[in-house]
Each structure stands twice: as C-alpha cells, then as structure tokens.
Image (cartoon, rainbow, N blue to C red):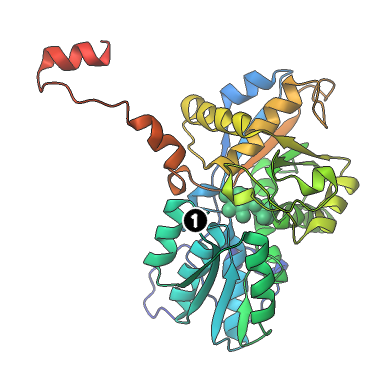
Amino acid sequence: MMTSKLRQSGGVIEHYREYLPVRASTPIVSLAEGNTPLVYCSQLSSRVGRGCEVFVKNEGVNPTGSFKDRGMTVAVSKAMEHCAKALICASTGNTSASAAAYAARAGIPCIVVLPAGKIASGKLVQAFAYGARIVAIDGNFDDALRIVRELGDGHRFVIVNSINPDRIAGQKTAAFEIVDVLEDAPDFHLLPVGNAGNITAYWAGYRDYKSHQRSTRLPTMIGFQAAGAAPIFHNRIVEKPETIASAIRIGNPASWKQACAAVAESHGAIDIVSDEEILEAQSWLAKHEGIFVEPASAAAVAGLFKCCESDQAAYSFQNIPEASRIVCTVTGHGLKDPDPITQRMKELKPVAASVTDVRRASGL
Ligand SMILES: *Cc1c(COP(=O)(O)O)cnc(C)c1O
C-alpha cells in the first residue's frame, strides 16, 4: 500500500470495481492496465467506405503489451485474496508474459507450461525477465492446457488461463471503455479468436453495460480464426493447428460454447483469414495507420477487409447501414513477435558515411 498522497493512475479494478468480482478486502494487484487508446482510423474508414467510422482498440499498449493484463489483474488479485501459493498457466506466449509480471508484483511464483519452440521471441523474453519458472513441453498449447488443468488445485495453485472466470470478468472492461468513449456500443465489433475467452468477455461486457443502461444497443460480434487453426469455423477440433499467428494457434478452444453463443445472440459470425491475409493486414495497418501489432491481432483487420471486399465472407459488409461504427480490437503489440519482419531486415546493407551515399541510398 502506498503511503504518500501521490496520485497514481489506477487500473481496471479501480475504474470498474462495481462490475467486477472484488470486495473491499481484496488486495489489488495492478500495473495500471487498461484505459488503452481507441484510435479513429481514417484510412481504414475510407477503405471500408459507406461513411463508416472504424476505430482500433489498441490493446498492445497494456503494461505487458497485450489485453491479457486486464484479466490478469483480477485473477491475481482474487488469487491473493484466497492466499494462493503460486500461479500456473499454459500459454501461447502472452498469458505467460502477463501472469509472470503480475506474479512478480504479488510476490508469488509463476509456473508457465509452454509448447517448445512455438513461442514468439519477445513473449518468451518477457516470461524470463519477470522471473517465471518456465517448462517447455514437446506438445502444443492444447497439451499444455490439459496438463495445467491437472496441476492446478483451486486455491493454492491457481490456474490463470481464461478458464479462470476472473480472467473473463477483467477482460470485460475493454468493452466498458469502448462504450464510455463512443457514448454507446459500436454497431460491429471485430476481433481475433483463439481460446475464445476474449470474444466471450467482450460480449458479456457489452451486455452488462446495456443492462445497467450505460448503452442503448449491442454490437454484432464477428470473430476471426486463422485458416489453419479454425475449430469453431469448421465445428471440429483441429489436432495440429498451424498458423503464423501463434497467439491464436489453438485447436480446441476453452470457451468454444460461449463464443458460439456470443455470435448467435449478436447475429454475428466466426470467419477465417489466411496467414497471407494476416501478414498483409499487419503490414497495411503499420504503414497506413502507424499501429504495429502482432500477427494474431492483425487477424481482426484482415477480417475487416474480408467483410468489405470478399464474396467468401461469412459476414458481408456490402449492405451494412451507412455510417456504421466499427471497432477492431488489436490484441497485442508488434514488438512481441518480430521474427516474420526481421527476415526482411536482411536486405539492409550499409553504405559509406557520406551525404552523397546516404542521399543516393535513401532515394532523396
Ligand atoms: C490471447 C490472445 C488472443 C486470443 O484471445 P482468446 O481470448 O484466446 O480468443 C489473440 N491475440 C493475442 C495477441 C493474444 O494474446
């Protein structure tokens, strides 16, 4: 507890306490997560056309660089309320980065079970830096989660994957923030889907806010899976999910049913985007809007393009009302997963340190 009167910015629990499962006695473990930018994107809007306004909810700006921090502050605070001895999680990368940071903050150990060789370098660096106990397995994320489910025991060794309902509760705050800024819910909400915790959380958040008269409507939810890891889209478990977007490389989503409910109740859709479309959208967003996101996050933007431009889209924007408001959540920061782009940096060859050479090389 801070003793001075310095005003520190609070996190999502401080802002949205009445909507979250915390009590006065819950010790708050926070890194001032949330309150992320909702960025109006003029170039994206004109690509969509029809006078639509497109906003990007930039979750890469959270303390560990992904939306996972919103759920983690609640999950770890509740774990501390129940006198947890350690946190444990399976991860495709961002959950481990976030869990490790909040465990460090809480002063308890964090055990991370990862698929060996499948974690983006920036995320693995984070887990090491925050001092997690890292175990790599010869298996995929779904195997790691199965093991973690057996190791966790409720109160002492708390599982902080999105099967923990406190994670979902915390992640609802992103929907609250969007409504608070737009002064109502958007017409459409697009986001990537992996384990499907986040689409579940957004939908719950929009519904909570509407039932408290904080908004007048609910958005249509449209979720995007990578084509090689699309169990919900195909309605069957994918044994060996494959995609460059490691954060959504999941074959058997934990919140499968809830995601289907969100999509059905909001009259939305689950669709797929290819790795090529994902990388194209990642690069487009960085170059046209100045927002650099990791590949999984770009799935939402690739999905937006598909809705507007492809006759294969599960949800077509051809007939959406003029001036619709569209929000795309970009879930994690681009620096977490530099490998696909570092390939291209090999083309960089030094020139002599002279004005003439620099002028020539830069095409001035
Ligand atoms: C976790 C994660 C996802 C997937 O979210 P789910 O809740 O598992 O559907 C997408 N993008 C990034 C960057 C993530 O870290």
Residue 284 in percent (x, y) is at 53, 26
141 versus 215 height, above or below = below
Residue 350 in percent (x, y) is at 19, 26
Q: Quadrant of the N terminus?
A: bottom left
Q: Secondary structure at mark 1?
A: loop
Q: Identify which residue is drawn at 82% across, 31% down.
A: 315
Q: Identify which residue is drawn at 69% across, 79% down.
A: 150
Q: Identify which residue is drawn at 66% across, 38% down.
A: 300
Q: Residues within 10 Å of mark 1 (few under 14, many from 20)?
A: few
Left or right of 88: which side holds 202? right
Residue 28 in percent (x, y) is at 54, 76
Give the camera-side residue of 241 and 260: 241
Q: Quadrant of the C terminus?
A: top left
Residue 269, image quadrant: top right
Left or right of 346: which side holds 264? right
Q: Identify which residue is drawn at 36% across, 77% down.
A: 4
Residue 245, image quadrant: top right
318 versus 297 height, above or below = above
Residue matched to label 1? 117
Left or right of 33: which side holds 345? left
Q: Is residue 1 visible?
A: yes
4 versus 84 height, above or below = above
| Amino acid marked by disc 1 | Gly
Give the camera-side residue of 24 and 5: 24
Residue 202 in percent (x, y) is at 73, 53
